[in-house]
Image: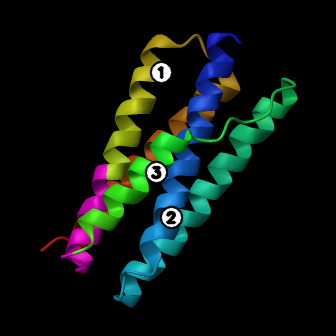
Amino acid sequence: MDSNELFLQELYKNTTMGADSIVDLMDKASDPRMRAEMTAELEKYQQFSARAAELLGERGLKPEEPGMMAKAGAKIGMTFNTMLDVTTSHIAEMMINGATMGIINIEKQMNSADAAPETKKLAEDVLKFEKSTAENLSRFLK
C-alpha cells in the first residue's frame, strides 16, 4: 500500500471514529440544540467516511475499520468521562477534544503523505469541517 492509500485509510478511520463517537454520546445529550448539532455532525462524518471508502474502492481496496483497541478505548473513555458529568458543556468539551485529535492526525498525514489530488481535497474538507466543528461546539461551553 502506498502513502496515498494509507492516508485514505487514516481518513476513513478518523471519520468513522468521529461518527461512532457521536452515536455513543448522542443518548447522553439532553439539550435539543446540542442534539441537533450532533446530528448534523454525524451526517457529515458519515459522508466523509463514505467518500474515503469510495476512493479506496476505486483503488481496489476495502476500508479498514478502526482497530478493536481504538474503538474500545474510545468507548471506555466516553463512558468514564460521562459517568459523573453529562452536562451539555462537558459533552461539547469532549467533542471538541475529539475534533482536535482528528485535526492533529490529518495535519500530520498531510505533512508526510504523498497524496493524490482527490485525497488532499477530501483531507482539506475534513480538516475544515473539524475546525468548524470545534468552533461551533464552543458556544455550548460554560
Among the two numbered marks 2 and 3 on one chain, the one whose residue lies closer to the N terminus:
2
**In which image quadrant can residue 35 be found?**
bottom left
Q: Position of residue 36 (x, y in %)?
A: 47, 80
Q: Position of residue 23 (x, y in %)?
A: 52, 69
Number of the label disc, if any, that sits on residue 110? 1
Who's the residue at 47% across and 21% down the image?
A: 110
In the picture, which quadrant includes the N terminus? top right
Question: How many residues crowd around disc 3 within 10 Å: few (fewer than 14), some, or many (20 or more)?
Answer: few
Who's the residue at 74% across and 40% down the image?
A: 53
Decide: marks 2, 3 in contact (CB < 8 A)? no
Number of the label disc, if any, that sits on residue 72? 3
Q: Amino acid at mark 1?
A: Met
Question: Mark 3 against mark 1, which lies toward the viewer?
Answer: 3
The residue segment tinted magenta is 84-97
Number of the label disc, if any, that sits on residue 41? 2
Who's the residue at 61% across and 12% down the image?
A: 3
Q: Amino acid at mark 3?
A: Ala
- Left or right, 138 with respect to 23, comes to left
Secondary structure of residue under mark 1: helix
> Distance of mark 3 from mark 1, alpha carbons?
27 Å
